[in-house]
Image: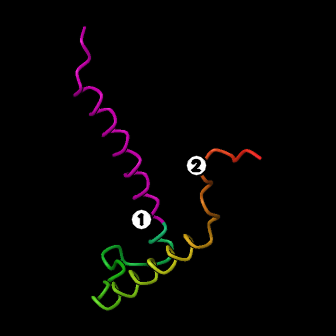
């Protein structure tokens, strides 16, 4: 009996759906406990200037981490003495 890809993909989707549903239930309970309106949400969004600042910070940190790494080992054969 051949395995149908549908059987595998649906099982994975349903598992992920169940995990997400449980996470949303926990978030809803947490919001109710703290008296946060479920439709309120964060309400914020990044402006173009904010997005550029975040991008700049990420690039700067990335370049710092590259400089902090030790250099890659040389691929040359050891010299004979």
Report the quarter where the N terminus lies.
top left
Circle 1 is placed at which residue position? 28
Q: Quadrant of residue 40?
A: bottom left
In magenta, the rendered stretch is 1-29
> In the current view of this chain or complex, which residue is farthest to the right?
81
Above or below for 10 versus 27: above
Q: Residue 75 shows which numbered tag?
A: 2
What is the x, y in percent for residue 44? Answer: 33, 85
Q: Left of 78 or right of it: where is 48?
A: left
Magenta: main secondary structure equals helix
The magenta stretch spans residue 48: no
| Element class at badge 1 | helix
Q: Left of 42 or right of it: where is 58?
A: right
Q: Quadrant of residue 46?
A: bottom left
In the foreground, 45 or 23:
45
What is the x, y in percent for residue 8? Answer: 30, 28
CB atoms of marks 1 and 2 within 8 Å: no
The magenta stretch spans residue 14: yes
Q: Gap between marks 1 and 2, in whole Å?
A: 56 Å
What is the x, y in percent for residue 26? Answer: 47, 59
* Label 2 packing within 10 angstroms: few (<14), some (14-19), many (20+): few
């Amino acid at each position: 009996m051949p395995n149908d890809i549908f059987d595998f993909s649906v099982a994975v989707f349903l598992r992920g759906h169940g995990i997400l549903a449980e996470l949303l239930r926990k978030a809803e309970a947490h919001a109710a406990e703290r008296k946060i309106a479920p439709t309120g949400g964060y309400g914020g969004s990044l402006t173009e200037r904010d997005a550029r600042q975040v991008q700049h910070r990420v690039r700067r940190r990335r370049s710092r981490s590259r400089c902090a790494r030790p250099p890659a080992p040389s691929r040359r054969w050891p010299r004979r003495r």
